[in-house]
Amino acid sequence: MADNQKRILEMLAEKRITVEEAEKLLSLIGSKEETGDELPETPVHEKKSHKYLRVVVQPGDGGDPGQQADKVNIRVPMNLIRAGMKLTALIPSHATDKVNEALKEKGIDFDLRNLKADDIEELVTALSDLEVDVQSGKETVHIYVE
Amino acid sequence: MNRPPLLMRVHIKNSNKKFCLWLPLFLIFPIIAVLVLIMAPVILLAGGVLWYTGWGRPLLLIIPLVLSCLCAMRGLEVDINDNREKVLISIK
């Protein structure tokens, strides 16, 4: 139970859920405890449309205290990712063949011509579930979508 | 499509120098729009001429795609601090 509460509070701190949703989840924990069921994996609200891809690198606890650690905070709009992928339409057909050949040599059997707007949207939607959390001694890396 | 960004801020600082730029994009866009309008017939003509070489379609698509990329940049923020340098790029 303590782990579930901690997860909810972490999600609230990261602003992935609102205060009302956190309250609802915490009350669910309380009621599920009585019945002995497990906490649902996803919050009860509908999935929001994600606007930004965030990359946050912060110093960890194991770094050199005398040296200022690197801090990185990057926010990329998801619309920019969509627009950037549509730039493949600028590649002429003969250049596309060369790109496909180069990809095949590297073991990637993918045809750039098959990349359609629906695929891009599906890829970006799938990216919305991406979360990377790496903690080493020197720094913590957190990649997520908000 | 988003609205185009209005302001761009670039701030670079290291031990030797400091560079700070506030660029009001809303003043530059009308100038760019006029230039695009002037160049539009030339681009259309070039697109028609180059169509069968394979470069016509990219040439005709470049302006709307670049415009959509520019509008999508609204909200981009890059903030990097290390021992030697601080870099901030913000487009709002």
Image (cartoon, coloured by chain):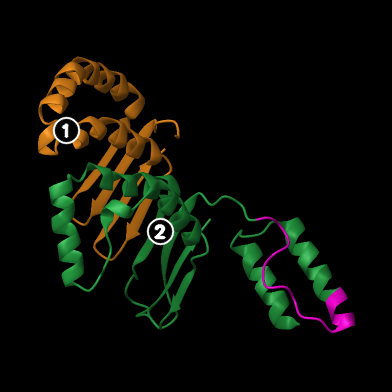
Which three-letter amino acid code belongs to the residue tagged 2? Asn
In this rendering, would B36 be left or right of A40?
A: left
Of residues B66 and B16, the one drawn nearer to the viewer in this rendering: B66
Which three-letter amino acid code belongs to the residue tagged 1? Gly
Q: Which residue is mark 1?
A: B56
Q: Is residue A21 above or below residue A64?
A: above
> Which mark, by number, is residue A15?
none
In this rendering, would A110 be left or right of A73?
A: left
Of residues A35 and B27, the one drawn nearer to the viewer in this rendering: A35
Q: Which residue is mark 2?
A: A73
Is residue A91 visible to us here? yes
* Residue A31 coordinates in the image, percent (x, y): 87, 74
- Shown in green, the chain is A
Separation of residues labelled 2 and 1 (CA atoms) = 40 Å
SS assignment at label 1: helix
Question: Which of the 4 image quarters holds residue B9?
Answer: top left
